[in-house]
Image: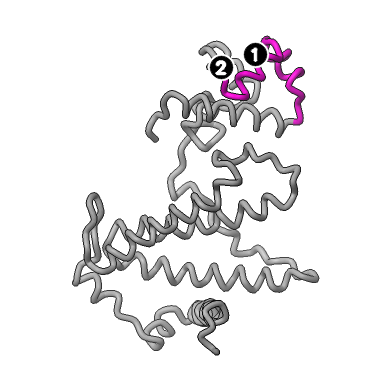
C-alpha cells in the first residue's frame, strides 16, 4: 500500500484515534490520562489540529493494542498485516440461516444474490481483461458499500468515524466512482483500450458465448437463481421506466 502523506496521515490518525477510543467507551479525559498527555492535546490529535510525535504514536498503538501502521491508516488490519485471498475464510457450508418471522426474504435474497455472483465471477474469469475484472469487482463492492452505509446510519448512535468519507458526501462520491467503473467496463467490453487499461480481445469474446441452455448446463444448481435475479431486476427497471405502460 502506498504511504499516505501530509494531511491524509493526520486526518486518518485523528479518525482512527477517535474511533478506537469511542469503541472502547473511554472518555477523552481518561484516555488522555492513560496516554500521559493533557486532554486538550489529545483533543487536538483527535481533531487533526496537531501532529503527534513518534513516542506518542508508539504509546497509543500499545495502549489500543493495534499497530502503528493501522493508526496511520496504512493498513486496514489492526495488527498491521495484509491478507491475501487465501486468508479469507469461505462461508461455512454447514451453516444454516435461521428461519424466523421476517427472515425468509433475507435468506431467499441472500441465496439469490450469492448464487448469481458465483455465476457472474465464473463468467468474469473468462473475459481475459484485467480491467473488466477490476472494475466490475469494484462496482459491486461500491454498491455493497453504499447500501451498507445506509444500514449503518439507521442507528444515529453509530460512530461515523468508522468511515473516512463524510456521510453527506458519500452517496454522490460512491455514484461517481461507480459511474467511472461502468465507463471503463463499457470501453473494455467494446474492445477499446483506455490509457492504462486493457480490453477484451476477440478470442476471449468467443469464450463468452452463452445461451439459456449453456448456462443451465454449466450451472445447473445456480442457474435458477441467476434467472430469478434477472427477472426481478428487469421488473424493477420496467416499473421505474414505465416499459409496461
Residue 129 lies, in percent from the top left, at 27, 61
Point out the tag, 1 or 2, that comes first from the N-terminus: 1
Q: Is residue 165 above or below residue 171?
A: above
The picture places residue 213, in percent across and down from the top left corner, at 39, 88
- With respect to residue 166, does 231 lie above or below? below
Q: Are marks 1 and 2 in contact (CB under 8 Å)?
A: yes
* In this picture, residue 190 sits left or right of residue 48: left
Which circle marks residue 41 in the picture? 1
Would you say residue 49 sits in the magenta stretch?
yes
As for residue 69 lying within the magenta part, the answer is: no
Task: Compute the Cα span from label 1 to label 2.
Answer: 8 Å
Residue 190: which quarter of the image?
bottom left
Callout 2: 10 Å neighbours few (<14), some, many (20+)?
A: some
Above or below: residue 141 compared with residue 84: below
Q: Of helix, strand and loop, which mostly describes the magenta segment?
A: helix
| Residue 117 located left or right of residue 136 | right
Tell me if residue 221 can be seen. Answer: no
What's the residue at 52%, 71% (across, down)? 115
* Image quarter in which the N terminus is found: top left
- The mark found on residue 5 in the picture is none
Residue 238 in sight in this render: yes
Using a 10 Å C-alpha cutoff, classify the residue at mark 1 as few (fewer than 14 neighbours), some (14 to 19) or many (20 or more). Answer: some
- Residue matched to label 2: 50
**x 32%, y 65%: residue:** 186
Name which quarter of the figure residue 120 lies in.
bottom left
Magenta-drawn segment: 25-50
Amino acid at each position: 500500500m502506498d504511504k499516505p502523506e501530509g494531511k491524509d496521515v493526520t486526518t486518518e490518525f485523528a479518525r482512527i484515534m477517535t474511533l478506537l477510543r469511542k469503541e472502547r467507551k473511554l472518555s477523552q479525559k481518561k484516555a488522555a490520562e492513560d496516554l500521559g498527555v493533557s486532554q486538550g492535546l489529545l483533543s487536538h490529535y483527535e481533531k487533526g489540529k496537531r501532529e503527534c510525535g513518534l513516542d506518542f504514536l508508539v504509546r497509543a498503538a500499545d495502549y489500543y493494542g493495534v499497530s502503528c501502521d493501522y493508526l496511520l491508516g496504512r493498513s486496514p488490519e489492526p495488527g498491521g498485516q495484509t491478507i491475501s485471498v487465501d486468508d479469507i475464510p469461505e462461508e461455512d457450508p454447514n451453516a444454516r440461516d435461521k428461519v424466523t418471522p421476517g427472515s425468509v426474504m433475507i435468506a431467499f435474497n441472500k441465496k439469490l444474490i450469492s448464487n448469481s455472483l458465483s455465476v457472474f465471477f465464473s463468467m468474469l474469469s473468462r473475459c481475459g481483461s484485467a480491467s473488466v475484472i477490476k472494475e466490475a469487482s469494484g462496482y459491486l463492492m461500491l454498491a455493497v458499500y453504499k447500501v451498507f452505509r445506509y444500514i449503518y446510519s439507521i442507528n444515529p448512535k453509530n460512530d461515523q468515524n468508522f468511515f473516512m468519507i463524510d456521510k453527506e458526501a458519500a452517496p454522490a462520491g460512491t455514484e461517481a466512482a461507480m459511474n467511472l467503473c461502468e465507463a471503463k467496463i463499457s470501453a473494455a467490453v467494446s474492445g477499446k483500450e483506455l490509457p492504462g487499461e486493457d480490453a477484451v480481445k476477440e478470442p476471449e469474446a468467443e469464450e463468452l458465448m452463452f445461451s439459456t441452455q449453456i448456462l443451465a448446463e454449466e450451472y445447473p444448481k445456480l442457474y435458477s437463481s441467476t434467472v430469478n435475479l434477472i427477472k426481478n431486476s428487469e421488473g424493477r427497471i420496467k416499473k421505474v421506466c414505465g416499459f409496461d405502460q
